[in-house]
Amino acid sequence: MELSMQLQQKQQLNLALTPQLKQSLDILSYSMNDLITHIKEQAEANPLMELEPSPLLETTLDLARIPVQGTTFAESNELPFQITANEQSLELVLMEQLAMQKQLTQLEKQVVLYFIQNLNDSGYLQCELEEVADEFTLPLTACEELLKVLQSFEPAGIGARTVQECLLLQLRNQKNIPHYTNQIIVDHLDELAGKEFDQLAAIYEISLNEVAQVLAFIQTLNPRPVYEVAPREIQYIVPDIIVESFGDEFVIRINDLYMPQISVNHYYEELLQENAQVADYLKGKLSEVLLLKKGIEQRHETLYNVTKIILDYQQAFLTEGKKALKPLRLKDVAQVTGLHESTISRTTRSKFIQTPHGTFALKIFFVRGLPTEDGTQNSVLHIKEMIKQIIAQENPLKPYSDQKITSLLVEQGIVIARRTVAKYREQLGIAQSTKREKNNSKGVY
């Protein structure tokens, strides 16, 4: 065989992430607060950019600090923003630990990052593993293993789904744990919290002093692990989208009232035409201003279109509230819009929407569903509401067990496991049947 060298031409299509495209994607993912901060940072670095601050924002924040009859405007519904805790430090701490997980693939790191982005203010996981498995097309067992990776991070207890799991995660690194601590956390935490020491002593055949030792030890654990990372800082959340009711119609608008107005400095604009020596530099800065304005316009357009599709599907929410939310996934919205799932994720991430029912994170509209016998799906929120109704209608002196509630749901066509019912009941803040029976017999029901 004769070997030779030769030149060949080949056409190939590659996607290049230009600085302009990167800025556009970044702007799309910004919340309103982040976008305002980004605009101000750009203005500080660009002499051509002038900002006219929004007087509405400054006035609003000043009013929010004025006490009125024992409260503040910010705590009422009179202004379109709410107060929330700052989670940036927690996310940074967890992402630094994630970066050290060299054994994980890129996809696995994306899943763990998804978990991190779905932690609530106390550090508990707020998404279902079935939802994550569906989102990333992974087996449920793989998602369970990746959750364990997050739960191995500091602070101990992060990524738990219940108080019991949070406390159990913290036991891993503890020494001199009193006997039966693990079992009491799993099965009788309500009794311990209710100071039913005699009953616990009888169940585990231990002394009252030993029960007290378990209580004292558990009190050293932290049911809100996120508070160990940093002191809670208060910041103001400005909603990105506002939905208003006009008669029987609902109108969506992008909230840009608080954004500073961007313009070009006329002095430098004239200098651009007169001075050739600085023309190239100024042209680059002018291009940055125009690209920023275009990116903001695209953000608003995409956010409006995605929100409209979401609310068209979740119309019942506008009249009935959260209990009427139907199962919805990112891929469902992506298919309707023709956009990629990652674009929908960026669009809805860290965004807040003000509605007639209150201000919520936009991601609440993405609800996992459970299958029914007829092949349709019921949202988790709807199933939780059904559980509340079943318990509300039970005989106070003979409350339904989790297994009985499961059977009643199955009779209504809901395919659900007993442990899932128990988890939803705990998330609703409803005690187990034995505890309800005891309270009812005391007239607490």
Image (cartoon, helix red, strand yellow):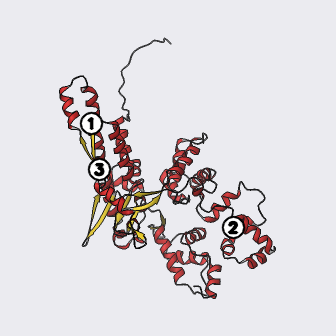
Task: Please name the residue that numbered disc 3 is placed on.
Answer: 53
Q: Residues within 10 Å of mark 1 (few under 14, many from 20)?
A: many
The answer to whether residue 31 shows anywhere in this view is: no
The disc at residue 185 is 2
Q: Residue 122: horizontal and vertical position, in percent?
A: 55, 60
Tell me the element at label 1.
loop
Instruction: Name the residue rendered at 48%, 53% in the picture.
Output: 135
The answer to whether 241 is drawn above or below residue 246 in the figure is above
Task: Please name the residue that numbered disc 1 is placed on.
Answer: 48
For the C terminus, which image quadrant? bottom right
**Disc 2 residue type (three-letter):** Ile
Q: Is residue 398 left or right of residue 294?
A: right
Q: How many marks?
A: 3
Asked if the residues shown at circle 2 and circle 3 are in contact, with their CB atoms under 8 angstroms apart, the answer is: no
Q: Quadrant of residue 211?
A: bottom right
The answer to whether 428 is drawn above or below residue 90 in the figure is below
Gap in Å between the C-alphas at discs 3 and 1? 16 Å
Q: Is residue 309 left or right of residue 373?
A: left
Q: Earlier in the sequence, mark 3 or mark 1?
A: 1
Q: Residues within 10 Å of mark 2 (few under 14, many from 20)?
A: many
Q: Quadrant of residue 251?
A: bottom left
Q: Residue 296: horizontal and vertical position, in percent?
A: 30, 46
Instruction: Name the residue rendered at 68%, 65% in the picture.
Output: 219
